[in-house]
Image: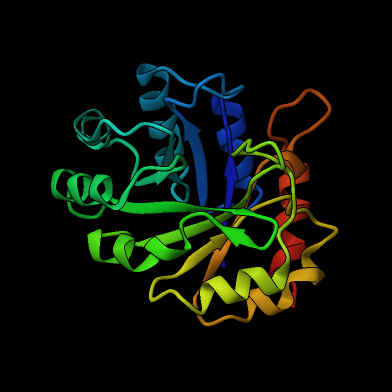
Amino acid sequence: MLVKFCGATTAAEVRGVADAGADLVGLWHQVPAGRAELSAQRLAGLAAAARATGRLQPVLVTFGSDVEALARLTAGGGPWWIQLHGYQPPATVRALRALVPDGVRIVKVLHVQGASCVEAGLIGAYERAGTDCFLLDAVTADGRIGSTALPLKQATVTALADRMARPFLLAGGLSADNAGRFRGAVAHPRFLGIDVDSAARGPGGLLAEAHAAAVATAWRTP
């Protein structure tokens, strides 16, 4: 199981989630009004800090669709994963796949509102375009996406996973307290790991090692 904590803004947060047992750290760039938004320079610095831990892989989390700009961010030792968190079409994935260095993994977020997934009919197209894996995340009733802290229904998760040929990461209000609610999703043959934001944060709003460790331990405990 891969464990990803999202929205780091400091090198201390990066080191903390690495020490907590994380595999991936999400770094935001081109996330309009995002509380963890990073400049390209800060993104490069934190990506380097992640790699310096010896275990943590940086993930560029973006609503952007300028494939040339995104590809430049992965050049020269940039993030190893790109998470497309907006409503970018399969054509964007195809164009990005043609530009990024070998080894860069493309994650396409699928947005789920209630029991409905906006992109469900495009899963096959995203796979053919070059998506390496999907991330399932919740959309609020008013359409807000990203770090909503809303949990998905397990039946919805597994139904979508059954339509995929690629692995998936699970997001949406995951915490140390609700790991047991998703054992069916974890047991799915295409389950790859979890993506957590809010539950890994301390009182000051930053990612905290103790909170992150509690989440990682709970989800990795049979």
Quadrant placement of the C terminus:
bottom right
- The image position of residue 99, as x and y in percent, is 15, 43
Going 36% across and 31% down the picture, which residue do you hit? Answer: 64
Location of residue 191 by image quarter: bottom right
Which colour scheme appears in the figure?
rainbow
Quadrant placement of the N terminus:
bottom right
Question: Among all residues in the image, which is located at the extreme left?
Answer: 98
Does the rendering let one see residue 114?
Answer: yes
User: Number of marks in the image?
Assistant: 0
Location of residue 41 by image quarter: top left
Identify which residue, 220 or 178, lies in the foreground.
178
Does the rendering let one see residue 209?
Answer: no
- The image position of residue 117, as x and y in percent, is 55, 58
Identify which residue, 102 or 22, lies in the foreground.
102
Judge left or right: residue 111 versus residue 39.
right
- The image position of residue 47, as x and y in percent, is 40, 33
Location of residue 78 by image quarter: top left
Going 72% across and 65% down the picture, which residue do you hit? Answer: 219
- The image position of residue 74, as x and y in percent, is 26, 37
Going 14% across and 49% down the picture, which residue do you hit? Answer: 98
Going 21% across and 30% down the picture, which residue do you hit? Answer: 72
Identify which residue, 10 or 117, lies in the foreground.
117
Judge left or right: residue 189 versus residue 147.
left
